[in-house]
């Protein structure tokens, strides 16, 4: 009877920092927390610049506003437990709190994937049909795209949380990271997790999987259009508008691919490899996106410089 009680009572999870380096957690936290704070500050700056400058109220910048919001959400969902582990060695997180964090992390990740696809569509329309650009991407259309992206993510991830809640766990369960993600929670279950595993795979394929294929298709169409342009200067100008977006896509999908590959094929990889790639996947896109768009987007760069000069 006591054994059954330990399985069915509300479980707790133990988060993991950097195994074997616990004495250096404070020092490790300095670069990690600095990057998180830079990411939050950078995305808040992008949001402020776009919101307060009427000249930036255009489709491209609306999508950038949504990207900054999703990056801010992703950083805010991850940072509290990372800080609690690295600063205070507080590793215990209760089941419902863990599920909530998992829901937010995966929701914002899928939202980001959808926004990156929307931005690719924006560039495709701007390059292929520049004269009809504002007619196709009206404010109503952008609102509908944004709502569609957010609702898709929210509804896809919610059943995954319910399926995890139905599983049985031990009283204490060791997780691999300093935050909660679906695959890690699922691995801790001591009951049949096949349905949860299959649903998780379906969510990944129907969200980031479909989005990545459509992104590739969008850029194939963009390249075909650009190569049909008469002069080298026009080709360069057209492609230059896509560089920031390509950087955002690569910083989002490369760490995701690395994490997927190491989970599937890196069974002999040291635990630190999993932890580093998982942290890169959640930290790098929110950090890099505002920097790239601030440097490469002339209008954003000019507004930021103008704000600092006035102050």
Image (spheres, helix red, strand yellow):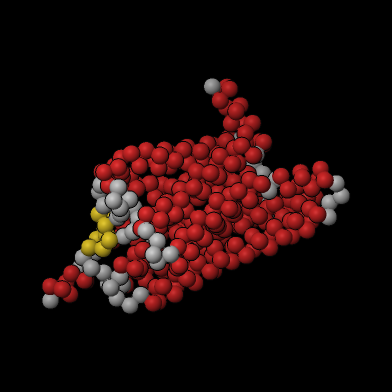
Q: Viewed as shown, does residue 162 lie left or right of 304? A: left
- The relative height of residue 87 versus residue 195 in the rendered view (above or below) is above
Quarter of the rendering occupied by the C terminus: top right
Image coords of residue 22 (percent x, y): 27, 47
Query: Image quarter for residue 118?
Result: bottom right
- The relative height of residue 290 versus residue 268 in the rendered view (above or below) is above
Query: Image quarter for residue 265?
Result: bottom left
Residue located 28% across and 51% down the image: 20
Is 296 in front, or is 99? 296
Residue farthest left in this picture: 2
Image coords of residue 148 (percent x, y): 56, 60
Is 60 in front, or is 2? 2
Image coords of residue 6 (percent x, y): 18, 69
Residue located 60% across and 48% down the image: 247
Residue located 65% across and 39% down the image: 297
Residue 73 appears in the picture as rendered? no
């Amino acid at each position: 009877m006591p054994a059954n009680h330990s399985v069915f009572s509300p479980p707790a999870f133990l988060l993991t920092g950097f195994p074997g380096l616990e004495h250096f957690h404070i020092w490790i936290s300095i670069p990690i927390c600095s990057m998180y704070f830079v990411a939050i500050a950078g995305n808040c700056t992008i949001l402020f610049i776009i919101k307060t400058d009427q000249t930036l109220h255009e489709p491209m910048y609306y999508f950038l506003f949504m990207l900054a919001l999703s990056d801010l959400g992703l950083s805010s969902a991850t940072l509290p437990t990372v800080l609690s582990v690295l600063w205070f060695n507080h590793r215990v997180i209760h089941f419902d709190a863990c599920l909530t964090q998992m829901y937010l992390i995966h929701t914002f990740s899928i939202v980001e994937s959808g926004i990156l696809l929307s931005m690719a569509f924006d560039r495709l329309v701007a390059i292929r049909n520049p004269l009809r650009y504002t007619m196709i991407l009206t404010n109503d259309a952008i609102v509908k795209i944004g709502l569609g992206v957010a609702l898709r993510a929210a509804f896809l991830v919610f059943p995954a949380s319910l399926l995890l809640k139905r599983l049985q766990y031990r009283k204490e369960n060791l997780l691999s990271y300093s935050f909660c993600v679906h695959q890690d929670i699922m691995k801790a279950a001591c009951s049949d997790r096949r349905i949860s595993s299959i649903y998780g795979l379906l969510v990944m394929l129907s969200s980031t999987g479909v989005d990545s294929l459509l992104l590739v298709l969008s850029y194939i169409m963009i390249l075909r259009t650009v190569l049909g342009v008469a002069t080298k200067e026009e080709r360069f100008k057209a492609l230059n508008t896509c560089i920031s977006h390509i950087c955002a896509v690569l910083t989002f999908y490369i760490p995701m691919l690395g994490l997927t590959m190491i989970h599937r094929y890196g069974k002999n990889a040291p635990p630190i490899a999993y932890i580093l790639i998982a942290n890169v996947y959640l930290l790098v896109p929110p950090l890099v996106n505002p920097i790239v768009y601030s440097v490469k987007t002339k209008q954003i760069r000019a507004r930021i410089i103008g704000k600092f000069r006035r102050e």
